[in-house]
Image (cartoon, rainbow, N blue to C red):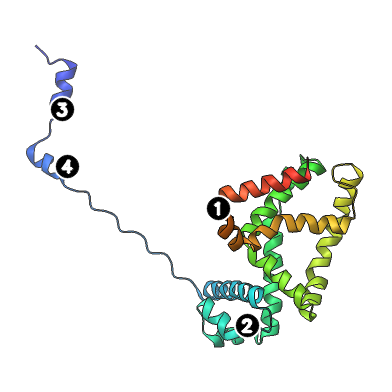
Amino acid sequence: MPPSPSEKSTRTRAAKPSEKKRSLAKTPKRPHKARAPLNRKQKLDRTRVAILQSALEHFGRMGFEGVSLRTIATAAGVNHGMIRHIYGDKDELWRQAVTFLFERTSIELSQNAEVLAGLDDRDRLKAYVRRYVEYCARHPEHARMMIQQSILAGPELTWAAEQFIRVRHSRDLPFLERLKQAGVLPDVDTIALHFIIVGACQMIYLLAPEVRAVNGRNVFSPDAVKKHADAVVGILFR
């Protein structure tokens, strides 16, 4: 009598002893492909970013006069001569660090035009405030840098204002005026309103050590960042 389909299948699947041994043998792991080494330009770009980030951190905490190129180089993990080779002197490094700062701001705060097209002004501001809070949490050195320069009120701040800040204000203030006229925002001085919003978004990250000492909260955790964004939006749009 011919075997049933199940018996036939079982016989077909039966393996010879030698085949069983081979099947039980561990399959050799494929070696991981090594990453391609960085070329000269990639290495230089990575070095530049490390130097500029270190410069922002130190200029923000210690001011222009309070920090040396050697300190910035050590924190960036590069030779002191590398900074002089790339930037020449501290004045040029400061200008390049501020340029890097505001270019990064523009990139990280930009939003897809298609997304914005579907939002009215009220919702556009809500979305911007949330992105700005997240940006301030990622880069508290930005606010530290600007506050430090405002305290010193030197030529460096004048240069930054002329190159970057005034342009941003000329764009943002008319937008706030439009929201005031529509009754979305309170009818108060527009410049004061602008800095109230900016301060509400960024100040908690400047006072992070105080918040942790008093309340035990890590303001940089994702949950805390979301709560802060919700709070700012909730106050602005009651």
Residue type pointed to by label 4: Ser
Disc 1 crowd rating (10 Å Cα; few below 14, some 14-19, many 20+) is: few
Residue 214 located left or right of residue 200: left
Mark 1 and mark 2 in contact (Cβ < 8 Å)?
no
**Can you tell which mark lies on residue 67?**
2
Residue annotated with mark 1: 221
Rounded to the nearest angstrom, the CA distance separating label 2 from label 1 is 30 Å
Residue type pointed to by label 3: Thr
Rounded to the nearest angstrom, the CA distance separating label 3 from label 2 is 78 Å
In what quadrant of the picture does the N terminus appear? top left
x 15%, y 21%: residue? 8
Element at label 3: helix
Residue type pointed to by label 2: Val
Element at label 1: loop
- At which x and y percent is residue 18? 8, 42
Residue annotated with mark 4: 23
x 69%, y 71%: residue? 145
Disc 2 crowd rating (10 Å Cα; few below 14, some 14-19, many 20+) is: some
Disc 3 crowd rating (10 Å Cα; few below 14, some 14-19, many 20+) is: few
Q: Which of marks 4 and 3 is nearer the N terminus?
A: 3
- At which x and y percent is residue 39? 50, 73
Q: Which of marks 4 and 2 is nearer the N terminus?
A: 4
Q: Earlier in the sequence, mark 1 or mark 4?
A: 4
Disc 4 crowd rating (10 Å Cα; few below 14, some 14-19, many 20+) is: few
**Along the viewing direction, whichever of 38 and 17 lies nearer the viewer:** 38
Snapshot quadrant of residue 95:
bottom right
Rounded to the nearest angstrom, the CA distance separating label 3 from label 1 is 59 Å
Residue annotated with mark 3: 12
